[in-house]
Amino acid sequence: MVHRYFGMEVHLFIILFGSMYSTLLSSGLLSKEESEKTVEFLLSRPITRMSVVTQKLAVYVIYVTLFTGITWSVSYATMLRYQASFDKATFWALGGMTYLAILAIASLGFLGSVFVTQNRTVYSAALGLVLGLYALQIVSDVSEKASFLRFITPFKWAFPADILPRGGVDPVSVALAAIVILASIAGAYRVYSKKDIAV
């Protein structure tokens, strides 16, 4: 089993700060040109709005993948160095679910960037989103009446105390992450393609 310290302490920092980083990145992508008053230059280029969304989508997906891949690989190397024995399959299952959780939160930020035009507003909302979802995870853990919140917050989908004893991820959590990611991306495409962009 993965060492308790890593599962409960190190993982918290990875998913919390990873979510902040990725959401701050994704939430400013579709509002950047409007905020910096360079949207006229962007729209004058021979490029469709769908292509703009696709390229910006690729940016945050690549960065989230690199962030999670590097931090998890370093964590794995550290575990090999200091932990004599641990369940490697469970370790990577937790890593995969952590990646999906961070990507889901980043996708919500990406969708949110369609609706605002000022980066200051976007960044405040992005941090509020991450901290709000983290607070929901805490509430779902301490109150049985609020246990339904585990279906709402991605932090609960990748919670080590749930994944490690099980030896794998919950298929429901994977499905929820996939739904949030795909729905957020689809929503961003739909709204941005019809958005009245202020020049």
Image (tube, rainbow, N blue to C red):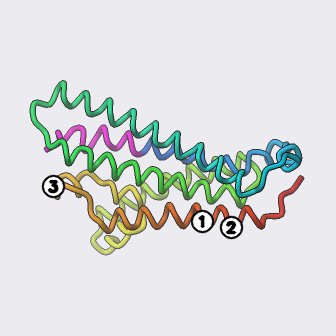
Q: Residue furthest left?
A: 85
Magenta part of the protein: which range?
Answer: 1-15
Label 3 to label 2: alpha-carbon separation: 41 Å
Labels 1 and 2 touching (C-beta < 8 A): yes
Label 3 to label 1: alpha-carbon separation: 35 Å
What kind of element bears circle 1?
A: helix
Corner quadrant of residue 24: top right
Q: Callout 3, which amino acid? A: Pro
Q: Does the stretch in magenta take in 47?
A: no
Label 1 to label 2: alpha-carbon separation: 6 Å
In the image, residue 58 lies at what x, y percent? 58, 46
What kind of element bears circle 2?
A: helix
Q: Answer left or right for 173 relative to 24.
A: left
Q: Answer left or right for 8 relative to 176.
A: left
Q: Answer left or right for 33 relative to 190.
A: right
Quadrant of the image for the N terminus?
top left
Between 21 and 95, the one nearer to me in the picture = 95
Crowd rating for badge 1 (residues with CA inside 10 Å; few <14, some 14–19, many 20+):
few
Relative to 146, say whether 16 is above or below: above
| Residue pictured at 32% horizontal, 33% vertical | 73
Between 98 and 42, the one nearer to me in the picture = 42
Quickly name the residue at label 1.
186
Quickly name the residue at label 2.
190
Quickly name the residue at label 3.
165
In the image, residue 31 lies at what x, y percent? 73, 50
